[in-house]
Image (cartoon, coloured by chain):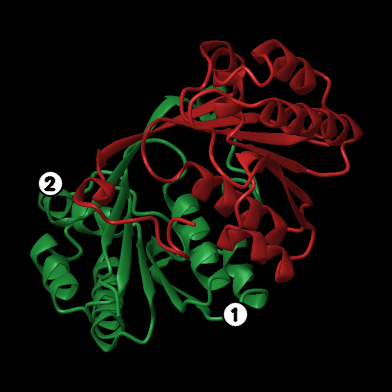
Chain colours: A red, B green
């Protein structure tokens, strides 16, 4: 089986989770199995519903129903660590061809777990598994480790004009 | 009905079409109708199959089954112009909530049609229609016109290591 690569989508622009979702859809359309883990987020995003339509796609959330405001709570840490453990197993078993670790960069930024722990589970993955990691502020160590890194750079954003996040577009 | 905005995904990094595809999926999951037009491309990408799974999504290609190498042929120009006409009608009618104009920036780069023609069909769209335009080398005039612009910047890419485009990941 072919070697799987590690992609990172980072930067302050729109499109990181969206690109990961697009890649997940392309992969299932090609007959691959996809495991999509969302860290930090536990909100009811529209994209969660796509498992009702697409085969071989699982989405699991390992976050609370609100964003971390100042400091993470013990609950934030516990959920994230549990998520990392689940993902470690999913990566090692190799039953899924593509594993998305959405917003994982934010989890390491908040020190819910360490970059070293992340690199370890990536190292221990079944070799054919392709991995996508998203989130602003990707750690330099993860960037060094990854095979493909795209920075989504905000050139212009309508949030600055006061447009709120809308269902079906941003969430 | 709410105003629709114009998004541009440009830059030399991976993730532009993929993000547009992800946005299309999120939108249909929220009950919206999506028209996804691909300019330049006429190849059998995996993502074309997602219309078999998802409701309210149409994908139409207005390109040949190979990329433009040096100069566009008359065939390239004809197909692109036909595509722009179809999209003009789709945008004006407003039956779709989201219209993706994938690789349109490449079509204007190759002068298959002009940026002025593009801005005109955007101006004449039904006001609630959200539009996503993708492709490298977005015209400065389109960037000025758009509400949201993200530059996908290549930080690292495995193409440089000789990894070819793979089914279900790149295509």
Q: Is residue B45 visible?
A: no
Q: Mark 2 — residue?
A: B140
Chain assignment, label 2 = B
> Is B50 in front, or is A152?
A152
Which picture quadrant has residue B51?
Answer: bottom right
Residue B5, percent across and down?
26, 63
Residue B56, placed above or below residue B66: below
> Which residue: 23% across, 74% down?
B81
Query: Is there a contact, CB below 8 Å, between mark 1 and mark 2?
Result: no
Image quadrant holding the N terminus of chain A, namely top right
> Which residue: 39% across, 56% down?
A165
Is residue A45 rendered to the left or right of residue B153?
Answer: right
Chain assignment, label 1 = B
Residue B141, percent across and down?
10, 52
Q: Mark 1 — residue?
A: B55
Residue A123, placed above or below residue A101: above
**Closer to the eye: label 1 or 2:** 1
Q: Is residue A136 visible?
A: yes
Residue A138, placed above or below residue B163: above
Q: Secondary structure at mark 2?
A: helix
> Is B154 in front, or is A41?
A41
Is residue A170 rendered to the left or right of residue A57?
Answer: left
Residue B142, placed above or below residue B25: above
Which picture quadrant has residue A3?
Answer: top right
Residue A64, percent across and down?
65, 42
Residue B88, percent across and down?
23, 80
């Amino acid at each position: 089986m072919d070697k799987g690569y590690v992609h990172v989508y980072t930067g302050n622009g729109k499109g990181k989770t969206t690109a990961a979702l697009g890649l997940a859809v392309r992969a299932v359309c090609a007959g691959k199995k996809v495991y999509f883990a969302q860290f930090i987020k536990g909100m009811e995003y529209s994209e969660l519903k796509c498992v009702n339509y697409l085969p071989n796609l699982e989405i699991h959330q390992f976050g609370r129903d609100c964003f971390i405001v100042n400091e993470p709570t013990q609950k934030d840490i516990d959920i994230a660590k549990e998520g990392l453990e689940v993902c470690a197993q999913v990566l090692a078993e190799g039953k899924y061809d593509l594993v998305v670790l959405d917003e994982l960069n934010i989890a390491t930024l908040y020190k819910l777990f360490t970059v070293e722990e992340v690199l370890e589970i990536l190292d221990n993955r079944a070799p054919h598994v392709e991995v996508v990691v998203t989130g602003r502020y990707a750690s330099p160590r993860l960037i060094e480790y990854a095979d493909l890194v795209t920075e989504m750079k905000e050139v212009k954003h309508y949030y600055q004009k006061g447009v709120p996040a809308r269902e079906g577009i941003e969430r």
